[in-house]
Every structure is written in C-alpha cells, then in structure tokens.
Image (cartoon, rainbow, N blue to C red):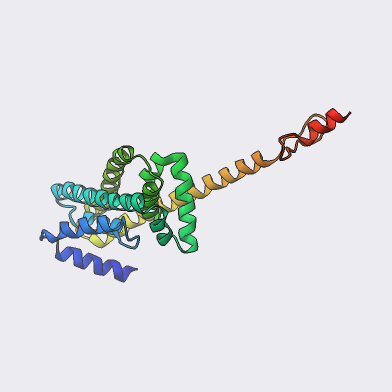
Amino acid sequence: MLDLLSRMTDFLEGLLQSPWLWVVVLLVSALDGLLPFMPSDTTLILVGVLVAPDPLRLVLLIIVAAVGCLLGDLVSYVIGRYSGTAMLDRFTRDEKGQQRREWAVSQLHKHGTLLILVGRYIPAGRVATMITAGALRYPTRKFLIIEVVAVAVWAAFFALLGYAGGASFQHRPALGMLMAFGTALTLAALLALGRRFLAKRRAGAQAVRSVPPMRGNGLVENTTSTGTSKYSAMRSAR
C-alpha cells in the first residue's frame, strides 16, 4: 500500500507543472464512475497535498475533479437507463456485488436523494448507485440537480482534505499525506459503522413488526388466504 502511494505521489509530482496533471485528475475522477478500482479519492488527496502552497490550483483541482466525477456518473446513469438490469447484473455477479446491489435498490426507493449524495463514499457504491438509478428510471432532472451538489461536495471534501494536510506540513509532504489519509480512513470507518448500526435498527424494527399482535384473551390473529382471521372464525362459531 505504501509502495503504491509512493509511486502515485512520484507520478503526480512529476506532472505538477504540466497541463497533463489536470487531464489525469479528470480521467481518474470520471472513470471511477465505471471502474470501482480507480483511485479517485486517493488522487484528489495526493494532488491536494502537492498543490497546498497555491490556493488557485486548489480551486482548479476541485472544479476539474467535480466535472470528471459528473461525467462519469452521467455515463453510468445512461448505461443503466438504456440497458436496464443487464449491465447491473454484470457489475454485481459476485456475492458482495449482490449485497451492494440489494442495498442500493432498497435505499434508492426509500432515500434516493441521500443515496446519490453519500453512495460515492462507500467502496464500489458509486457504480452500483448510478447504474441502479438509471435502471430504475430515477427522474433525470432530479438526478442531475442532486448530482451537481454531490460531485461538488465530493471534490471539495477530498481536495481540501489533502490541502489541509499539505498546508500543515509544507516541508514534510509525506506527513501531510499520512494525516489526510488517516482522516479519510477514520471518516470511512465511521460511515461504515453508521451503516451497520442503521441496518441493525431496521432489521430489529422489521422483526418487531413481523410478530402478530396479541388479542385480549391471548389468542393471536392469523389471517387466512381468504382474508378471514382464525380468531374471528372462532368468535363467530361460539
């Protein structure tokens, strides 16, 4: 992991004075909407650390990353919209993929706005969310409005995270990167714990609702296929 970060840092640092840096940021941010293994968050943090002495470059970083992220999400949304569930099946063939799909579908129905905003912070959640939104015909206009806000917040969050680390350790960028990544991992862990806590609460609430209510004499109402309860039938037979 550290070796990979070191290589990425050296590569991005070599492009720091070149326009190709922004091309790389744009492409990585966009492709992450189709290929979950693309390190868009990591790239933003690293570039944020490297441009820390220059606020104007930070603004440019946020804009370029947000545009790239928007383009990638729109492509995923369009693919889902026109391919239906076929493309979604391809991206969610393994067990974890199926779990992410089921989660995205259920949450999109219940909390579509919130899911589009936060789905990108969950590992591989961005692809599942965008393709699912398209496949389920989530309203395009509403999707675009939420998406613009979501990509702006995402780009600003990770770029500022890297910038804060770089500004705090201007002469020791490695420490700045460690601080930024440590903060990002902590927030990711808190988000994952929050998801598990909410999932357990929902499961508990569903379990409680599934228990048939007890009547006054202790008999439990159990509705038959004809719509008449056994309890009612017993009362009428008396």
Residue furthest to the bottom in view is 3
Q: Residue at x 40, y 57 (%)?
A: 86
Say which quarter of the image contains residue 150: top left
- The percent position of residue 98, horizontal first and vertical second, equals 48, 58
101 is higher (above) or lower (below) than 233: below
Front residue of 37/176: it is 37
Position of 161 compared to 228: left or right?
Answer: left
Residue furthest to the right in view is 238
Q: Residue at x 79, y 31 (%)?
A: 232
Could you tell me if residue 161 is visible in this image?
A: no
Could you tell me if residue 210 is visible in this image?
A: yes
Front residue of 6/96: it is 96
Q: Residue at x 16, y 49 (%)?
A: 60
Q: Residue at x 71, y 40 (%)?
A: 225
Position of 181 compared to 60: left or right?
Answer: right
Picture quarter with the C terminus: top right
- The percent position of residue 211, horizontal first and vertical second, equals 70, 40
Front residue of 12/140: it is 140
The mark total stands at 0
Position of 229 compared to 192: left or right?
Answer: right
- The percent position of residue 75, horizontal first and vertical second, equals 28, 52
Front residue of 21/88: it is 88
- The percent position of residue 166, horizontal first and vertical second, equals 23, 54
Picture quarter with the N terminus: bottom left
Say which quarter of the image contains residue 228: top right
